[in-house]
């Protein structure tokens, strides 16, 4: 972080501000309250955790009807449109490599050059270890992309949301977020101590009703949405959101993690999709693990915002700097995305083909726009896992999304399309989904099958 020299008093004031904002201020020790030890030692068993019990119950039920665990398969090749698991080839719909840039020669060469120059690690936080040229170069490239004054990159996409929201808001403030917001947004809101109010998915009338009723009760306000929703594949009304944030004096934050590389004619993201100036949004957030084929997250916005986060956000101050080869890979991927818009067009064609084929087969794709993320809503967790298992046996890898990640009635398979999928792969997959789903429904209730297995 480049700053002009400050007198000693200014440095002391800044240090005091940072430690106080992060909850590290010194205070008089408080007396320790003596409590009686818990007599029931079983509560210290990890197996007694309610979530663990539910997990074991789900796995037992799956085993009774012959279903394998659909998660944590070991992939023997790079993520992409195809994969190999236990020596078998699969058509893969569980990869965020939307534009096929993972392993692109230019991206891989940039990572190799960074390893040769800087090794594989930043070795400490950027506050401690200092900057690397790749951090600053990547931040400049992203700031230019969003036409923002500045950018800060962090080592984890999830932590970027958590630590940014947690640093900006506090008790007395309020956060309005879409009901289908990512876990990292909700966790950040909880960490902040601000009031948290969710509104019905993509329902700006519901958001305005909340703003009318409660905005006046709080000091600062933040509205948070996603550019492309990773569960449903739809996008918000950016123009409507900007109008509301201006009317009610709030910040607007867009998590564009799945939007970059997907939304808009050239994949620039939600602002291009909406045909609007990106400066209408106060905080652009995104991640590197999707289109940009790396790992980590970023925030773009006003220079004051970025400077504040670099001094106060725990996920930046106390976390190691982004790995140099990952920073180099992400910057190279951004450059390739901009230089090869035909990749975005192939992705759009593939998404349209999948959506049209799914609708022709009578499959429920919810509100998906057909842009990289397309769910097939099944409506029952066991049925979703069974469908995923049957497709796996046919050489199609797609993950089920089940309760509690989504409501039970909204359980689904979630297909991620890439620019590298072929039309044949898409048509064959959709036909297989329709065939297997019809067979499952013809076979009757899975609960009845489970009871029959039990005898």
Image (tube, helix red, strand yellow):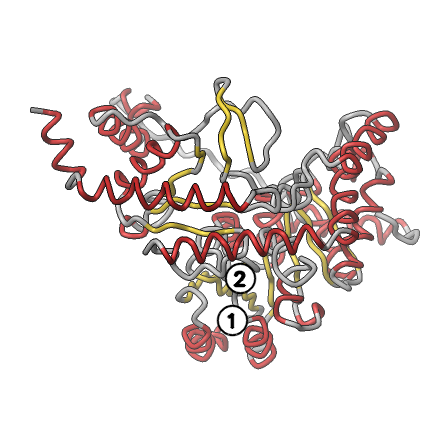
Left or right: residue 322 versus residue 427 is: right
Q: Position of residue 120 (x, y in %)?
A: 77, 26
Left or right: residue 369 versus residue 376 is: right
Q: Residue furthest front?
A: 424
**248 to 297, vertically: above or below:** below
Q: Which residue is mark 1?
A: 218
Q: Which residue is mark 2?
A: 225
Left or right: residue 161 versus residue 14 is: left
Mark nearer the N terminus (1 vs 2): 1
- State yes or no: discs 1 and 2 in contact (Cβ < 8 Å): no
123 or 352, nearer to the observer: 352
349 or 281, nearer to the observer: 349
**69 to 280, vertically: above or below:** above
Q: Quadrant of residue 305?
A: bottom right
368 or 209, nearer to the observer: 368
Quadrant in which the C terminus is drawn:
top left
Mark 1 vs mark 2: in front? 2
Q: Position of residue 438 (x, y in %)?
A: 25, 44
Q: Residue at x 20, y 25 (%)?
A: 64
Q: Residues within 10 Å of mark 1 (few under 14, many from 20)?
A: some
**455 to 105, vertically: above or below:** above
């Amino acid at each position: 972080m480049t700053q002009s020299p400050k007198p000693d008093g200014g440095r002391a004031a800044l240090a005091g501000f940072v430690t106080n904002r992060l909850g590290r201020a010194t205070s008089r020790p408080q007396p320790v309250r003596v409590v009686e030890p818990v007599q029931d030692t079983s509560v210290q068993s990890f197996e007694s955790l309610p979530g663990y019990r539910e997990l074991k119950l789900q796995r037992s039920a799956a085993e009774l009807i012959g279903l394998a665990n659909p998660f944590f398969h070991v992939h023997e090749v790079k993520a992409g449109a195809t994969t190999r698991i236990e020596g078998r080839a699969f058509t893969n719909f569980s990869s965020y490599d939307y534009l096929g840039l993972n392993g692109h020669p230019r991206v891989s060469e940039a990572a190799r050059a960074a390893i040769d120059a800087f090794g594989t690690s930043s070795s400490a936080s950027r506050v401690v270890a200092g900057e690397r040229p790749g951090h600053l170069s990547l931040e400049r490239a992203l700031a230019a992309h969003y036409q923002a004054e500045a950018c800060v990159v962090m080592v984890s996409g999830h932590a970027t949301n958590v630590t940014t929201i947690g640093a900006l808001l506090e008790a007395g403030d309020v956060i309005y977020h879409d009901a289908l917001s990512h876990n990292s947004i909700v966790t950040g809101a909880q960490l902040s101590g601000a009031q948290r109010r969710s509104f019905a998915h993509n329902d700006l009338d519901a958001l305005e009703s909340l703003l009318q009723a409660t905005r006046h009760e709080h000091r600062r306000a933040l509205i948070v949405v996603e550019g492309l929703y990773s569960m449903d594949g739809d996008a918000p009304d950016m123009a409507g959101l900007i109008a509301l944030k201006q009317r009610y004096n709030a910040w607007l934050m867009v998590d564009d993690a799945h939007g970059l590389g997907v939304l808009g004619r050239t994949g620039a993201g939600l602002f291009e999709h909406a045909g609007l100036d990106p400066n209408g949004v106060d905080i652009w957030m995104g991640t590197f693990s999707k289109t940009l084929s790396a790992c980590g997250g970023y925030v773009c916005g006003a220079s004051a915002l970025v400077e504040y986060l670099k001094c106060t956000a725990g996920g930046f101050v106390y976390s190691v700097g982004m790995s140099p080869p990952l920073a180099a890979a992400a910057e190279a991927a951004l450059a390739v995305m901009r230089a090869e818009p035909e990749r975005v067009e192939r992705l759009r064609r593939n998404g349209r083909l999948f959506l049209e084929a799914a609708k022709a087969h009578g499959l429920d794709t919810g509100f998906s726009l057909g842009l990289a993320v397309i769910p097939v809503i099944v409506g029952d967790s066991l049925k979703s896992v069974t469908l995923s298992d049957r497709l796996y046996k046919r050489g199609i890898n797609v993950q089920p999304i089940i309760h509690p990640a989504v409501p039970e009635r909204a359980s689904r398979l979630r297909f991620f399309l890439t620019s590298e999928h072929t039309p044949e792969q898409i048509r064959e997959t959709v036909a297989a989904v329709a065939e297997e789903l019809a067979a499952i429904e013809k076979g009757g209730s899975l609960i009845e099958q489970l009871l029959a297995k039990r005898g």
